[in-house]
Image (cartoon, helix red, strand yellow):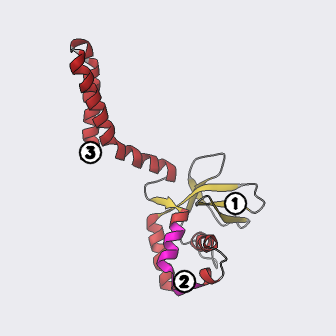
Amino acid sequence: MDAQTKAGLGLTLMGIAASLATPYLPLSIAAPAIALCFFGAAFLLWPAARSGMEKLKFGGAGRIPLFEAATRAYEQTQGTEAAIFDYANSESSDDILIRMCDRLTRYRDGKAPLVKLYGSKPPSREIEEIYMAPLNRYEFVVVNGSIILNEQTGSFQYENLTVDKKELAGAIAKMLENQAL
């Protein structure tokens, strides 16, 4: 636990103590003390709460949305042999990102995907690993600035797709190394 979080918890405890002491203190002293403690605690604890919300949303601290991962992968391979095929055979920027998602997450020539894919399958909100091998009838689709994995018939889909940042860095390095994935 970092010093800022400890200070925030300390102010919270001081606020609770001041609240319990209210019957014994004049209101002109107790009210500002309580307010100061709780506002200070909220200010100091906000970064910790925010990172906790991101962990819940993306299923882990080291994960990023697939849309961001595909964008990073394209940016870092743009202009190289690794990305020329994606660019040349795409009709839009969304197509480029979809091809990059396929390249990162699908089994190719019997080889495992470059990154593991995580997401939720509605109505569940729980983030879990998605095993891509049996999902050959699913395709990536860009919807409102994010990417979903949609069954071609449209019946089922996976949302909140994420990948591990470290795996992504390794995948990009592998793409640049091989240049012709």
Q: Earlier in the sequence, mark 3 or mark 1?
A: 3
82 lies above or below 168: below
Name the kind of residue labelled 3 in the image: Gln
**Mark-to-mark CA distance, 3 and 1:** 42 Å
Q: Earlier in the sequence, mark 3 or mark 2?
A: 3
Name the kind of residue labelled 1 in the image: Asn
> What residue does disc 1 label?
150
- Residue at x 51%, y 64% (from the top left corner): 68
> What residue does disc 2 label?
82
- Residue at x 28%, y 38% (from the top left corner): 8
**Mark-to-mark CA distance, 3 and 2:** 44 Å
Name the kind of residue labelled 2 in the image: Ala
* C-beta proximity under 8 Å, tags 3 and 1: no
The secondary structure type at the circle numbered 2 is helix
**Foreground: 80 or 138?**
80
Task: Using the image, tell me which numbered label, if any, was put on residue 178.
Answer: none
Counting from the top left corner in percent of width and height, residue 28 is at 22, 18
Q: Is residue 80 magenta?
A: yes
**Mark-to-mark CA distance, 2 and 1:** 26 Å
- Residue at x 22%, y 12% (from the top left corner): 24
> What residue does disc 3 label?
4
